[in-house]
Amino acid sequence: MTRAGSSGAEMPELDGAGLRIGIISARFNDHVVVPLRDGARRALARTGVADGDITEAWVPGAFELPLAAKALAQTGKVDAVICLGTVIRGDTPHFDYVCNEAARGIQRAQLDTGVPVMFGVLTVDTEQQALDRVEGRVMTNKGEEAAEGAVEMALLLKCLRA
Ligand code: INI
């Protein structure tokens, strides 16, 4: 919640101790997704989420993320789910179908279940753009950002529902 003297727009301090977090990763382009997933785990550890409170699963591609995320959210055993994947534009319309359905499905999974589901899916034109988003030189690792978002949303929803 907004603290006195704060605009509410700053990143709140995140204390993830006691939170249970799911990570669903898409194997397609795993040379990018593994660093995304490692970044997510690093950020969770930094906020105090215990290793034993993290549930991980892998799916074939980004298209399959929503179903697995929804199934995990429905167990009631996680406070948030992080979806990770990488879709690189090729010469076919496949890119648009995969991106659109992953985004739509992930949004639907969180709205249907009430469990925050983070969209940690890179949708880029080139492999270099994908690597820039995980290597930590040009930009922050996007898996770390998704993990921080998961902790923030899990804490916010606990607060709103208390
Ligand atoms: N899945 C991805 O995660 N990234 C991609 O770049 C990709 N491309 O380019 O095709 C991709 N396709 C597979 C898709 O997600 C499904 O696994 C497949 O269509 C089976 O349902």
Image (cartoon, rainbow, N blue to C red):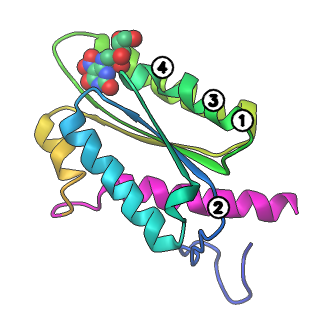
For residue 87: magenta? Answer: no
Image-based side of 30 in relation to 5, left or right: left
User: Mark 4 or mark 2, which is nearer the start of the sequence?
Assistant: 2
Q: Is 121 placed above or below 12 here? A: above
Which quarter of the rendered image does ligand 1 occupy? top left
The residue carrying pointer 1 sits among few (fewer than 14), some (14 to 19) or many (20 or more) residues within 10 Å by Cα, namely few
User: Mark 2 or mark 3, which is nearer the start of the sequence?
Assistant: 2
Labels 1, 4: front one = 1
Q: What secondary structure is the stretch in magenta mostly built from?
A: helix
Whole-angstrom CA distance, mark 3 to mark 2, is: 18 Å
The residue wearing badge 1 is 75
For residue 152: magenta? Answer: yes
User: Mark 1 or mark 3, which is nearer the start of the sequence?
Assistant: 3
Q: Amino acid at mark 3?
A: Lys
Which quarter of the figure is the N terminus placed in?
Answer: bottom right
User: Cβ(mark 1) to ligand 1 < 8 Å?
Assistant: no
Which quarter of the figure is the C terminus placed in?
Answer: bottom right
The residue wearing badge 4 is 101
* Location of residue 3 (image quadrant): bottom right
Image-based side of 28 in relation to 114, left or right: left
Q: Is 9 placed above or below 36 here? A: below
The residue wearing badge 3 is 70
Labels 3, 1: front one = 1
**Disc assigned to residue 36:** none
Q: Amino acid at mark 4?
A: Glu
Look at the numbered disc 1 and give the secondary structure of its residue: loop
Q: Do residues under tags 1 and 4 come within 8 Å of each other at their CB atoms?
A: no
Residue found at the very far right of the displayed protein: 162
Which residues, given as a range, are shown in magenta? Answer: 137-162
Whole-angstrom CA distance, mark 1 to mark 4, is: 23 Å
